[in-house]
Image (tube, grey):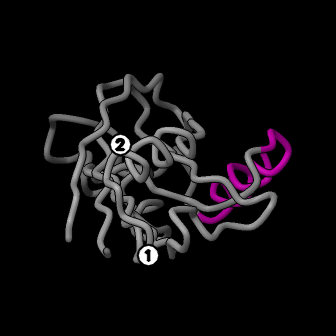
C-alpha cells in the first residue's frame, strides 16, 4: 500500500528551518500503515530535508560551514539569467539531501531520541513551500 500527502508551509527564507516531525507522524497515522517506510521529499530546488537534532546551535554551525564552503556573495552564473539571485541556495541544495527515507515498525518512525525531521529553506526570499510525505508498506 502507498499513501501520499503533500504538506504546505510558508517559509521565511534565508536559512529557514522548520521541524516537521509531528506533521510527518500525522501522515503516518492517517495512512494506517504499520510496517514499511516513509519518504519525505522537499519539492523545490533551494532547500533540503535533514534528520538532525533541532537545536539552534547545530543550525548555526551548519549555516556557518555552508557559508564557508558556498558563500552567499559570489559571481554565480545562475544570476546571469536575470530572474533571481539565489545561486548559493541552489549549490547548497546540491550538497545536501532533498529527501530522506525513514523505516516504520509498529506504526512508529524508527528515529533516534534526538533525531528530528527538518525542512530547510535556503532561498533568500520567503515563499510557499511543499513537502511530499509518502508512506509505503502494510
Q: What residue is shown at x 27% (from left), y 49% (from top)?
A: 44
Q: Which residues are magenta?
A: 55-69
Give the x, y percent position of residue 93: 42, 60
Task: Name the secondary structure under disc 2.
Answer: loop
36 falls in the magenta region: no
7 above or below 119? above
Q: Nearer the viewer, residue 43 or 122?
A: 43
Give the x, y percent position of residue 74: 47, 51
Mark 2 or 1: the one toward you: 1
Q: Nearer the viewer, residue 113 or 92?
A: 113
Q: Dividing the image into 4 quarters, which one contains the C terminus? A: bottom left
Any mark on residue 86, and which?
2
State the separation of the CA atoms marked 2 and 1.
40 Å
Question: In the image, is 37 to the left or to the right of 133?
Answer: right
For residue 115, which quarter of the picture? bottom right
For residue 34, which quarter of the picture? bottom left
Task: Name the secondary structure under disc 1.
Answer: loop
Which residue is denoted by mark 1 in the rendering?
35
Any mark on residue 134, and which?
none
Mark 2, residues whose alpha carbon is within 10 Å: few (<14), some, or many (≥20)? some
Q: What residue is shown at x 45% (from left), y 56% (from top)?
A: 48
Q: Nearer the viewer, residue 32 or 117?
A: 32
84 above or below 81? above
Task: Please name the predominant secondary structure of the magenta segment in the image.
Answer: helix
Q: What residue is shown at x 16% (from left), y 34% (from top)?
A: 83
26 above or below 40? above
For residue 68, which quarter of the picture? bottom right
Amino acid at each position: 500500500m502507498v499513501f501520499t500527502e503533500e504538506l504546505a508551509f510558508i517559509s521565511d527564507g534565508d536559512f529557514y528551518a522548520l521541524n516537521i516531525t509531528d506533521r510527518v507522524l500525522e501522515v503516518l497515522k492517517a495512512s494506517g500503515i504499520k510496517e514499511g517506510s516513509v519518504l519525505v521529499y522537499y519539492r523545490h530546488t533551494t532547500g533540503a530535508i535533514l534528520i538532525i537534532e533541532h537545536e539552534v546551535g547545530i543550525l548555526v554551525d551548519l549555516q556557518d560551514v555552508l557559508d564557508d564552503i558556498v558563500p552567499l556573495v559570489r559571481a554565480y552564473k545562475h544570476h546571469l539569467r536575470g530572474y533571481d539571485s539565489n545561486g548559493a541556495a541552489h549549490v547548497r541544495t546540491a550538497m545536501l539531501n532533498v529527501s530522506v527515507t525513514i523505516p516504520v515498525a509498529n506504526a512508529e518512525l524508527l528515529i533516534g531520541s534526538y533525531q528530528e525531521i527538518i525542512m530547510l529553506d535556503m532561498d533568500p526570499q520567503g515563499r510557499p513551500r511543499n513537502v511530499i510525505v509518502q508512506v509505503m508498506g502494510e
